[in-house]
Amino acid sequence: MYDLLLRQCRLLQTDRTIAEVDIAIQQGAIAVIAPHITEPATLELDLQKQLVSPPFVESHIHLDSALTIGEPRWNESGTLFEGIEIWRDRKQNLSLDDVKTRAIATLKQQAMQGVLFVRSHADVSETSLIALQALLEVRDAVKAWTTLQVVAFPQDGIYGGAQNDDLIEKAMAMGADAVGGIPHYELTREDGVKSVHRIFELAQKYDRLIDIHCDEIDDDQSRFLEVVAACAIRSGMGSRVTASHTTAFGSYNNAYAFKLLGLLRRTELNFIANPLINITLQGRTDTYPKRRGVTRVKELWQQGMNVSFGHDCIQDPWYSLGTGNMLDVASMGLHVCQMTGTAEIDACYDMVTWHGAKTLNVSDRYGVEVGKPANLIVLDAHDRYDAIRRRATVSYVISQGRLLATTEAPKSVWHDT
Ligand code: 17E
Ligand code: FE2
């Protein structure tokens, strides 16, 4: 007797081929995958050839600021910098309860849409470290149904305030999963370079991952990615390091970009683009032609680098929209990066699933395979292309072997004769 049996699945396998199978789940793990399973189960679901996929991965979000839209005011200019100012005001009155309530509400909203792995930044440039403490408590509170990683993110710069360097180290001691940074926002270029070295030093001292907000600006002179790449090459830590945003890469001249790509190929760095936010925050100082402000996703992917797509924000000072639907993110990425070839469209799906898992360093427990934890989603779709095109409904979410959420696909009825 299995705990859960999924019949008539179109399983999107790790090698990205689709197999028509039944899937049996026992004690939180995938027990059997076979064309026809006859043994009964406590709960059986006939999926009628819907697509079964590993869950969505949200590789970049700020849960501490999520759902604060309009508090204390709307970002009228739409720039990153006005967002940082609004957040600076809002974060003066954070409480553990406030952050935890919003973070859990957001995680539920995401999980209901199939997101079961999340990496969130927590602002640690505020002396009480309330945002970090709250997200660490949330990480524990939700662990029965979602996996949360927390990055200690120094929003105001590691050297932007006298206490900030101590605060980020304290955050690592408190148990943050990753060290963050924001070199392009440090007071000087030299401080930016120094901050990258400091981030690697902290990651090595505390044996943690790295995820840096890197070159999130249209300035073609913002070149901290090369510093991150050099540190990754020298430390050999590349696969544990992520460069988030790198929007300036979209503005570099091709001669420099070509050289940089060669340097990046020597690393195993992970990249995260946040297409919804990059397309709205960047390009704000341009008239026309107006830049897209997204990193060179297609070229990085073509070079074999690991690239994932994140949401970045849901209703906060930087982005007033967002629902937690990763297919929205994949669709925006597809459009803005012109990933319209067949393999490119499929890659956009992978950027919100497998590639995100690699970024989070959780690949060993990710994927619908016998013996792995039973985390999977059922999409009302035929394949990856269909899922993105129609923003398919996630009809079932299975987390650690349990049915966590169900959603009915919208159904239209034609009334004219
Ligand atoms: N902070 C930052 O520096 N950049 C962002 N995109 C967000 C917060 C959302
Ligand atoms: Fe971010």
Image (cartoon, rainbow, N blue to C red):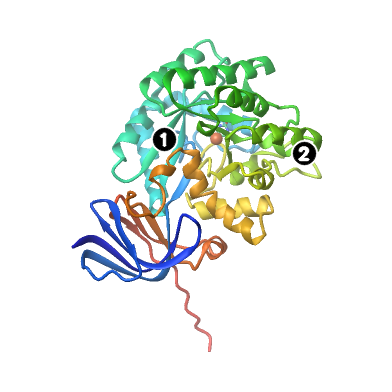
Image coords of residue 312 (percent x, y): 53, 40
Confirm whether residue 128 shows in the render. Answer: no
Vertical comparison of 59 with 7: above or below: above
Quadrant field for ligand 1: top right
| Label 1 neighbour load within 10 Å: few <14, some 14-19, many 20+ | some
Confirm whether residue 224 shows in the render. Answer: yes
**Residue type beneath disc 1:** Gln
Q: What element carries label 2?
A: loop
The quarter of the displayed image where residue 300 is located: top right
According to the image, label 2 marks what residue? 286
Vertical comparison of 94 with 338: above or below: above
**Residue type beneath disc 2:** Asp
According to the image, label 1 marks what residue? 149
Q: What element carries label 1?
A: strand
**Of 257 and 404, the residue lying toward us:** 257
The quarter of the displayed image where residue 260 is located: top right
